[in-house]
Image (tube, helix red, strand yellow):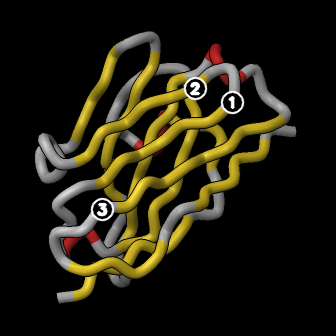
Amino acid sequence: QAQLVESGGGLVQVGGSLRLSCAASGITFSSYAVGWFRQAPGQERKFVAATNRGTGLYADSVKGRFAISRDNAKNTVYLQMNSLKPEDTAVYSCAMGLVVVDRPQAYTFWGQGTQVTVSS
């Protein structure tokens, strides 16, 4: 059974940085695309970034500020978040699927999420 566990969330001031991690187990990690999504209170889940085999895809709202990377040897994907804004506040979840797309429906396995709060 695949399991994804996120970590690295927390409270940060505007302009600060955080690095989220997502550790996978019970799955052939290198075979899957990995994505990050976020959901703010009262809003639908939104795409943030995804990667597989050197291909990266980002939401326009995070381009130039966020970077997704993966370490297949550690079964872990990272999301480096810089120049954080209050509107980045959300629960961030990682997900794994077969293709690098921005649709959450395309991802099969999901983590529980980690809270990121950006204070002004």
What is the CA distance from the residue labelled 2 to the residue labelled 1? 6 Å
Which residue has dot 2 on it?
Answer: 71
Name the residue located 12 percent from the left edge and 41 percent from the top edge: 64
Q: Which of the two residues, 85 or 40, is positioned nearer the viewer here?
A: 85
Type of residue at label 3?
Ser
Placement of the N terminus among the 4 image quadrants: top right
Name the residue located 69 percent from the left edge and 29 percent from the top edge: 74
What is the CA distance from the residue labelled 3 to the residue labelled 1? 23 Å
Mark 3 element type: loop
Q: Are marks 2 and 1 in contact (CB under 8 Å)?
A: yes
Q: Are marks 3 and 2 in contact (CB under 8 Å)?
A: no
What is the CA distance from the residue labelled 3 to the residue labelled 2? 20 Å
- Which percent across, then down, holds residue 37? 41, 52
Classify residue 40 as left or right of residue 73. left
Mark 2 element type: strand
Q: Nearer the viewer, mark 3 or mark 1?
A: 3
Residue 67, by quadrant, is top left
Please tell me how crowded label 3 is: few (under 14), some (14-19), or many (20+) other residues with Cα within 10 Å: some
Residue 16, by quadrant, is bottom left
Type of residue at label 2?
Asp
Type of residue at label 1?
Asn
Please tell me how crowded label 2 is: few (under 14), some (14-19), or many (20+) other residues with Cα within 10 Å: few
- Which percent across, then down, holds residue 30? 64, 17
**Relative to 40, is 63 above or below?**
above
Kindly identify which numbered label has been placed on residue 75: 1
Q: Which of the two residues, 5 or 14, is positioned nearer the viewer here?
A: 14
Which residue has dot 3 on it?
Answer: 17
